[in-house]
């Protein structure tokens, strides 16, 4: 029974782990036509990807009639407003009515974008008693304009979707987005600790290439200053100027890909440096909340978000992205065989009668036994330990097989 209990516990933990990131907000809301506009705009702004990539989230859904109030916003402003309706915590109806001290400030997705000054990316959630819960901005004196309407859907303690009575917005969120040409990309990079990379794209003209590409969507991976070690700098400076430009352009995608979208991407993706679909590509994957960029030569991870304001996203990475077309390691040469020495000539000594001599005295250092004794060699040691480790592995394997057999038999 103990084995059965352990097996059952393992299955439960496995199912919980699998369900932790199994929700799909688009499919969930598709079952509720009254939120079709809200659902459509979550996909259009790529917020759906952000929601699906999180493990703990509360979505404050707006009905179709309430979404009409946001119809005049441009796409970037709409995304900022809707980001205020994605809370990075779990609130079901029960928790809403049991808030400690009756009020709390909660972080929203807007706070993670780099576009929310101060605490404008937080919202105030207050239990107003009599069954009412208010939602509003976190700024001091701000009104609780929206109220809790009803629960829509909960999945475990990972996802909660609840309807609120009206949009939560701020002047910052609803303000028209600046023209892409107005965004100073290098200034954002320098402020975020990427001064070396910002200087390089400025002096090579790549910054202008990035600025021209923003209108159609741009994602930049900016190596922080510590990524430019002495060895990396030397390799980069040895490249011809055209190849240096290719390396810098390799750090950008010609599309807008926020972090949530990158987390759900699994495979190769073209960069601005790609002259053809198969060259200068990055392979994107994720492990938990970590996004990994594989160049074919090395791997880097996204370490932070400097700016996420559609159609532009700028992230920091911990290493320089080295395209395999320019940084592929040369094959290791085969070792040169050592010259074979000719054997020394054998000189025969004159034959003589053997002379008997007394045995050598025993001593700690001069003992013939010590001189001729062989301790265990490295190969002997590894050979003798191999059966032991193999036995342990076989024992563990046998135990696991036995456990599975017992579970199958008892079930």
Image (cartoon, rainbow, N blue to C red):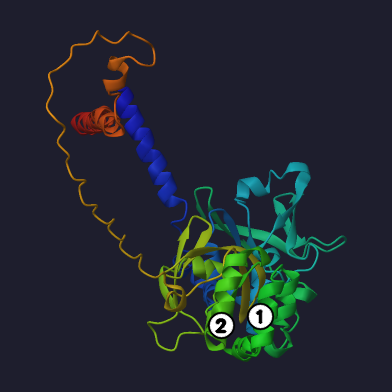
10 Å crowding of disc 2: few (<14), some (14-19), many (20+): some
Q: Is residue 86 left or right of residue 159?
A: right
Distance (Cα) linking label 2 and label 1 = 9 Å
Instruction: Identify the residue at image location x=39%, y=70%.
Output: 330
Q: Is mark 1 on a helix, strand or loop?
A: helix
Quadrant assignment, res 54 = bottom right
Query: How far from the left and from the top, in percent, is residue 150?
Result: 60, 58
Say if 79 sits above or below 3 in the image. below
Q: Which of 259 and 275 is in front in this view?
A: 275
Q: Name the residue carrying label 2.
A: 244
Residue under the point 81% across and 64% down: 118
Q: Which residue is at the front of the view, 228 or 111?
A: 228
Q: Name the residue under label 1.
A: 200
Q: Are marks 2 and 1 in contact (CB under 8 Å)?
A: yes
Q: Is residue 369 left or right of residue 248?
A: left
Tag 2's secondary structure? helix
> Residue 377's spot in the image, x, y percent?
29, 30
Q: Quadrant of residue 382?
A: top left
Residue 252 visible, this angle? no
Q: Where is residue 136 in the image (x, y as percent from the top left)?
A: 76, 62
Q: Earlier in the sequence, mark 2 or mark 1?
A: 1
């Amino acid at each position: 029974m103990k084995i059965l209990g352990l097996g059952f516990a393992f299955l439960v933990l496995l199912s919980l782990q699998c369900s932790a990131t199994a929700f799909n907000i688009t499919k969930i809301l598709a079952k509720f036509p009254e939120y079709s506009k809200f659902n459509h705009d979550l996909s259009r702004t790529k917020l759906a990807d952000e929601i699906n990539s999180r493990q703990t989230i509360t979505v404050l859904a707006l009905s179709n009639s309430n979404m009409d109030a946001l119809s005049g916003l441009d796409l970037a402003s709409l995304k900022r407003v809707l980001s205020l309706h994605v809370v990075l915590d779990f609130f079901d109806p029960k928790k809403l009515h049991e808030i400690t001290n009756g009020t709390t400030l909660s972080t929203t997705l807007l706070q993670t974008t780099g576009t929310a000054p101060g605490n404008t990316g937080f919202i105030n959630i207050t239990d107003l008693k009599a069954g009412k819960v208010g939602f509003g901005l976190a700024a001091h004196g701000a009104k609780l304009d929206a109220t809790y309407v009803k629960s829509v859907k909960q999945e475990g303690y990972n996802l909660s979707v609840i309807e609120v009575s009206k949009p939560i917005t701020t002047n910052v969120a609803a303000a028209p987005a600046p023209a892409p040409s107005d965004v100073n990309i290098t200034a954002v990079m320098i402020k975020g600790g990427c001064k070396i990379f910002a200087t390089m794209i400025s002096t090579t003209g790549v910054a202008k290439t990035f600025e021209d590409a923003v209108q159609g969507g741009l994602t930049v991976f900016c190596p922080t200053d510590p990524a430019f070690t002495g060895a990396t700098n030397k390799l980069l400076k040895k490249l011809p100027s055209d190849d240096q430009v290719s390396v810098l352009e390799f750090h950008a995608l010609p599309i807008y890909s926020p972090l949530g979208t990158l987390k759900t991407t699994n495979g190769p993706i073209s960069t601005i440096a790609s002259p053809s679909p198969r060259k200068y590509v990055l392979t994107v994957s994720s492990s938990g909340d970590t996004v990994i960029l594989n160049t074919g030569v090395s791997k880097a991870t996204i370490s932070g978000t400097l700016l996420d304001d559609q159609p532009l996203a700028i992230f920091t990475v911990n290493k320089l992205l080295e395209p395999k077309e320019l940084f592929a390691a040369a094959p290791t040469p085969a070792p040169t065989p050592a010259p074979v020495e000719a054997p020394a000539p054998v000189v025969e000594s004159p034959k003589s009668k053997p002379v008997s001599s007394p045995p050598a005295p025993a001593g700690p250092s001069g003992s013939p036994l010590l001189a001729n004794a062989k301790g265990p060699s490295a190969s002997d040691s590894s050979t003798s330990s191999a059966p032991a480790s193999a036995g342990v592995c076989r024992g563990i394997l046998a135990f696991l097989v036995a456990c599975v057999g017992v579970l199958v038999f008892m079930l």
